[in-house]
Each structure stands twice: as structure tokens, then as C-alpha cells.
Amino acid sequence: MTRYKCEFKEIHVPTCGQFLYRFEDCTEGTKHMIGLEPDGEYRTAWERGGILMVKCIIVKETPAGWWVVREDETYNGKRRWVSMGNGKRYAYPNPEDAWESYGKRKRKHCAILERQLKLVKDRLKAYEAGMPENI
């Protein structure tokens, strides 16, 4: 009989009024936004290398997850669903998990863009070879 050793990570489950975290790319419109970073300092997204930490306020809790609104959109914000289950989420209970999720998203984004670039280069090479006779 084989025995498995399991280690469980203590999980903080937030409730209404608390925050979930998400990291996003900084765009031209958000580069001057100031956010509280995991080290406790306030910095603009541009100072962080173009990465913005977004805090989402939990506005409703259900047995399966939370409804959240981005902190910068509380007046007219769109509510988003965040599951409590394992797997992909829009936002996470702590900045460390949100940072890991950002890294996974950027690696996937990079792989997609590399495939698209290869396709465009192949099409350009076909164009430069000249127009086919059978069109």
C-alpha cells in the first residue's frame, strides 16, 4: 500500500468589501495610474515597467465565487464573476497568485504572437516569390 504525503496551503478566503488582485498591461491611457504594489509602496504603472496592479472590490459573495468591480471603476463599473474554484480566474485573493497568473497569461500571449508572426512571414515570403499563375 502506497501512502502519499499531502501538504495544504493555508488559504485566506475574502468576503464582501475586501479586495482581489489582478496584474494587467499598462496602456497609454493607464500609464499615469498610481497603484499600491506588493511591497507597500505606491508607484505609477509606468514605473513598474508597464505593469499595473488592479484591485477589485468584492461586491457580492456566493457559495461558488464572488462578483467584483475594479477599484478604478466603482462609479460605473462592470461587475465581473470570479470563481472560488481552482483554475483560471479574473482576479486572485493575494498579489502573489495574481502575479503568477499574469506570468502565465504573458507566456501564452507570447506563444500566440510568435505563431502569428511566423504565419505572416510565410505569407510575405510567398508574396515576394511572385503571383501564382493559377489564380
Image (cartoon, grey):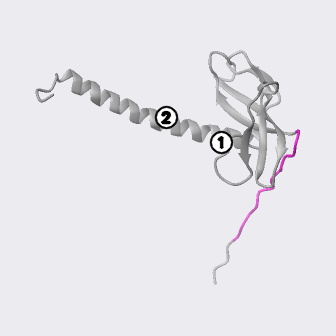
| Residue 7 image point, x, y percent | 74, 63
Q: Determine the main secondary structure of the stretch shown in magenta.
A: loop
Magenta segment: 5-17
Does dot 2 land on a helix, a strand or a loop? helix
Q: Which quadrant of the structure image shows residue 36?
A: top right
> Disc 1 or 2, which lies upstream in sequence?
1
Question: Who's the residue at 80% across and 23% down the image?
Answer: 42
- Identify the mark at residue 85; answer none if there is no mark: none
Q: Which residue is mark 2?
A: 110
Amino acid type assigned to the residue bearing label 1 in the image: Glu
Q: Which residue is mark 1?
A: 100
Using the rendered view, name the quadrant where residue 71 is placed. top right
Question: Residue 38 magenta-drawn?
Answer: no
Residue lying furthest left:
133
126 or 132: nearer the viewer: 132
Q: Residues within 10 Å of mark 1 (few under 14, many from 20)?
A: some
What is the secondary structure assignment of the residue under circle 1? helix
Is 104 placed above or below 28 here? below
Farthest bottom residue in view: 1
